[in-house]
Image (tube, coloured by chain):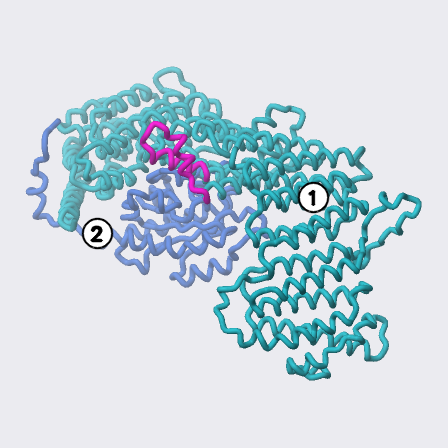
Chain colours: A blue, B cyan
Amino acid sequence: MGRVIILGDSGVGKTSLMNQYVNKRFSNQYKATIGADLHVLLTKEVMVNDRLVTMQLWDTAGQERFQSLGVAFYRGADCCVLVYDVNSSKSFETLDSWRDEFLIQASPHDPDNFPFVVLGNKVDVEENKRQVTQKRAMTWCQSKGNIPYFETSAKEAINVEQAFMEIAKNALQQEAEVELYADYPDPIKIDSESTQNYGCNC
Amino acid sequence: MAGPLVEEAKLLGEALNTVKINVLQMKRYLESDQLMDALKCASTMLAELRTSSLTPKQYYELYMSVFDALRHVSNYLYEAHTSGRHHLADLYELVQYAGNIVPRLYLMITVGAVYMSIPDAPVKEIMKDMMEMSRGVQHPTRGLFLRHYLSGQTRDHLPVGDDQGEGGNLQDSISFVLTNFIEMNKLWVRLQHQGHSRDREKREMERRELRILVGTNLVRLSSLEGVDLDMYQRTILPSILEQVVNCKDTIAQEYLMEVVIQVFTDEFHLHTLGPFLSATAQLQPKVNIKQIVIALIDRLAAYAAREAESEDPEVTKAQEEAAAKRLAEKVKQQKAVRAQQGGWAHQNGSAEEFSSDPEDVDAILELCQVLIREQRDAATGLGSVTHGYAKDPTGRRQQQSSMHLENEDLAEEQGWLAKMVHLFRSDSFDVQFDLIKAARKHFETGGDRMRFTFPALISSCFKLARRVKRNEDKVEEWQSKVAAILKFARQMLFTLSTQVEAHTPALRLFLLAAQISDECGFEDLTYDFYVQAFSVYEESISDSRAQLQAITLIIGTLQGAKVFGMDNYDTLIQKAAVHASRLLKKPHQATAVHLASHMWWQQAGPDEVVPEPDTTKEASEAKAYPHKDSKRVLECLQKSLRIASSAIEEIVTVQLYVDALDQYLYYMDRDAPAVTPKFVNSLVELITSSIDGIASTDFHPASRAPPGLIEGVQTPDMISRHFRNTLYYIQAKKAALAGPGKAERPNPKWEEIDVVGACLKMNIGVNGAA
């Protein structure tokens, strides 16, 4: 089970991308995930390298103020997807802080090689509204260790399938690597802990 | 503080470890198909969630690790059921034998949710049962997380069809989520009332952390497939609002209202502004209503902006206007409850006024749009009223809250209201006038607030009058219309000057009215406006400097008057001159008197065509403009010098002389026959001989009453510089006259002015070099 976290400013289309990918649906009506959802988990079975694997997609609130309980679900992520809106410079500029925040909170074993994928969403909007060029985005991705970059449209289903395939591959690879390092717990503790008795049986 | 935190972190570490160990074991059992043993491990692991010693964030971390583990169980269960090894119905019963309620319910939900995903499962029954059983956990934090698990696990399996049987339908799903929401909110609110009161802050912080769990339910409702406006309007929103209002908890109300705004679609909001805002009106006094209203407006504004981009502008406009209208009406009602008195009521009132008049549809919509734009500010004001309301525990809340409003606040608040007046706009002059009239009707009940709101209305009248005048050839009977508008403004001006004693604005506005009436050619009305200005001056303006400023304004306005016959004009300017010469302080007198001279020397603008005096008319009917009487001008100037010379301090005298010199030069250049170069020469001499006296003057500048219109004292240096500049000017004129003949030669009188002595005195080279 590959675990994928999707991050990015509110309104860039994280939920829409997931819905397009998992349910093949798109709604023009904006319903903010920001309101309150602790996390939304969608699963999807994918064929990667002739293996059927389940991908867990974790959608998040794009506004930090709504993450009132912290981001414990970052832990154990196998891939982090950074989404921005190509028609909003601001949403692109915050990718840095989303990435940093993720690395701090998720604290992966090998932060330098942790797989990210960047998606520039909403490329269906007219060209003259575009604020972030492909070149600028790719330069940034290169500077962060050749992060794969896709330009997508959840609305028109452009590149969504391809992007998530790449995400799945990355997640799978990471999962395999993590299992190598998997720290098995201290076996001595088993008995003492499991027999511990808590409170009443009510 | 460090102690308990370290302790909690340690507890969390231990709990996480227990989970980890049991997960490993559980996985192994699952792999070897030993379900009972696996469930036992799961139960042990879940028992960690029974703790009460973790903070919400830590508990969440623990919950997440358990959650991950339970996914393995879910996958196994599904597979086991579909492959026929176990039946979920049996397992659903089986897991309920677990000893502790928390592990038992988590297991039950895990199994139940998987069961729901199986075709032909008794979904409705399972949902009902799980909801009932979940009531068993009443500890707030544990209950909230358990119910969050319930909501998360069932999310993808909630029925959305219209099955009337066991399978359940959309209605069942809606009531399932709604019930969960209500129960969670109760748990969440209850947390506030537990434990010692000294821990209140800590508890409130914990509650803020936990709020997201409650809000998640609302997101679930919004993402339920097939929910339409009708269901939202009839079932969902009323249930949510009822719970929000009835829980009587400030934190919950603020948060949940915002979540409602964020998670549901624009279309839903547009059709439910009424119930939403009336619920807003019933929230606890401490709730920050401003925030809620702003969030709603932001949401609708963003919607309008998006729609405007993509849609037919006509449709958009209609929708926007309709929405704006609804919002305005609802906010009005809501605010009537909150702030019955004060400007708000008036603002609301104006909306009401127009809403009841179906003929002026345009005007109504316009006003509503104005209201929605201004709502942001209105909310600010409302916030402060609410604030005062909340702070005062006594019975006379409303009364006092408005008394407590600082004057500044009042001015700011009313300022917004006044600004709004200028947004009333209709292309029809009559409608515009009706708008103003209606606004006045409401403003005039505002008592002292008229001080702030009336000037805006009055200038709006003036604007309208000028618009009508500009279109005089298109408007029938424009004169009677303009006269009516001006008379209407006159009434408000009376109120302004007598009732709220805003004398200075009233005076200025009377003079402005006089100017406009003058432009439109109403002699009697103009005369009356001047009379009113004089009355305000005589009765109410008592400060010496304010008097000087007021009389200067009157002089300046009269100087441009064109409408009067000789008699009327003479009466008015005499009156003004008398007032000028009766100012209390000599320096003020001198300034006012030399300014008064201009009333006898009306100067037409450079491009202005001055009508020839109509000789066929009686002398009394002929227009005074442009009135020119250089003898009187000279009288004024000489009088001003006399007064100046009687000033106690020489520096003041000299300053006034220098000021007067400018006036002399002006009149001479404009060919006023009586003002001859002779006078100029002797004044220059006079200044030259006394200018030494000021340089050595030894006193503190602040001890002196400044003579001019401007506050502040001129230093000797400033005065002599002024004089030198005047001398340079004279020299330049003379040089231009002496130079080679050009088309525009200065007045030849400049030739006769002699400044050689003065220039020597002031160290100015005779040829202009300093």
Q: Choose between B371 and B7: the one closer to the eye.
A: B371
Q: Choose between A84 and B338: the one closer to the eye.
A: B338
User: Which amino acid, by three-letter code, is at mark 1?
Assistant: Tyr
- Where in the figure is residue B694, as x and y percent of width and height? 57, 74
Badge 1 sits on which subunit? B
Badge 2 sits on which subunit? A
Left or right: where B213 falls relative to B629: left
Residue that appears at 78% across and 71% down: B677
User: Which amino acid, by three-letter code, is at mark 2?
Assistant: Ala
* Residue B335 vertical position relative to residue B769 in the rendered view, above or below: above
Q: Which residues are magenta?
A: B381-408
- Where in the figure is residue B693, as x and y percent of width and height? 58, 75
Magenta part, dominant SS: helix
- Mark yes or no: residue B219 visible: no
| Mark 1 lies on residue | B530
Whether pointer 2 and pointer 1 mark residues with C-beta atoms closer than 8 Å, the reply is no
Q: Which quadrant is home to the C terminus of chain B?
A: bottom right
Q: The residue tagged with tag 2: helix, strand or loop?
A: loop
Do the residues indicated by labels 2 and 1 lie within the same chain of the protein?
A: no
Q: Quadrant of residue B630?
A: bottom right
How dense is the environment of label 1, judged by Cα within 10 Å: few (below 14), some, or many (20 and up)? many
**Tag of residue A182:** 2
Q: Quadrant of residue A35?
A: top left
Left or right: where B476 falls relative to B70: right
